[in-house]
Amino acid sequence: MTLAVSLGLGAVIGILLGLLGGGGSILAVPALVYGLGLDIEQAIPISLLVIGVASIVGALPKVRAHQIEWRLAGIFAAAGIPATFAGSAVGRLLPQSVVLIGFAAVMIAAAARMLLDPDDTGTACKTGDSGINWRRCATRSIPAGITVGFLTGLFGVGGGFLIIPALVLMLGVEMQTAVGTSLVIIVANSAAGLLSHLGGASIDWTITAAFAGAAIAASLLAGHVGTRVDTHRLQRWFAYLVFAVATYVLVDTLFLR
């Protein structure tokens, strides 16, 4: 029964990943905790595995299309990877209830971000038509990278809802390039987060394989049909769903446990 639930929940998360991109993974941890009854320490590495592999799959077309700012990705990852290990260490010191409340807050922030549709872009890194001055961006990229890395390690989230606004609004990176760059950063942070969590939790690899395998397969299938879906409207409904799940997490953690 548990295996069937793992496959079903993984498929749902995969469909959301395929249709919405990295943002769909924010429900992976709640699905594992409330759907499969895992502890937060067990759920986070499984979530990171799904996020990391899905991001690799999503990044490959961006690599071929040269839509990645590799130097900016390197700065974010260099700042974020140590912060990811720090976030994992802090998470092991906190009670599960505190981590869940913090995760609900991150979900609310992510959902609010999904409902925004800003048309403005920043200009901090722009150098006319010639591209991005990555050296000038370093002072802004490092704090953002540290923040995203810490959240990845602490909560098992990819952080795309923070990385993309930072790249577009703060640094002036074009949206398509920001998406590709974000995916590379998420892969690096997820790999670091997974490594930092493997030694601290007893992971059921059968559940992990079922959940991750179903999520990745479903994301690939959903990605092929995604062009026929109104993703803007779907993202809005998904944001409302994330708000609802965050509310449930808060109520359950604060009043029912």
Image (cartoon, grey):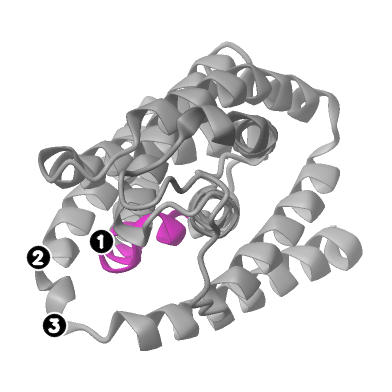
**Label 3 sits on residue:** 228
Q: CA distance from mark 1 to mark 3?
A: 12 Å
Give residue 84's position: percent from left, percent from top: 62, 25
**Label 1 sits on residue:** 18
User: Considering only vertical position in the picture, is 239 above or below 209?
Assistant: below
Q: Is residue 101 left or right of residue 193?
A: right
Residue displayed at 27% across by 86% down:
230
Q: Is residue 204 found inside the magenta-colored segment of the image?
A: no
**Label 2 sits on residue:** 224
Q: Which mark is residue 227?
A: none
Hey, what amino acid is under mark 3? Answer: Arg
User: Considering only vertical position in the picture, is 233 above or below 242?
Assistant: below
Location of residue 250 by image quarter: bottom right
Q: Is residue 219 left or right of residue 131?
A: left
**Image: magenta residue range:** 12-25
> In the rendered structure, are the residues bearing label 1 and label 2 in contact, judged by CB atoms less than 8 Å apart?
yes
Residue displayed at 55% across by 47% down:
159
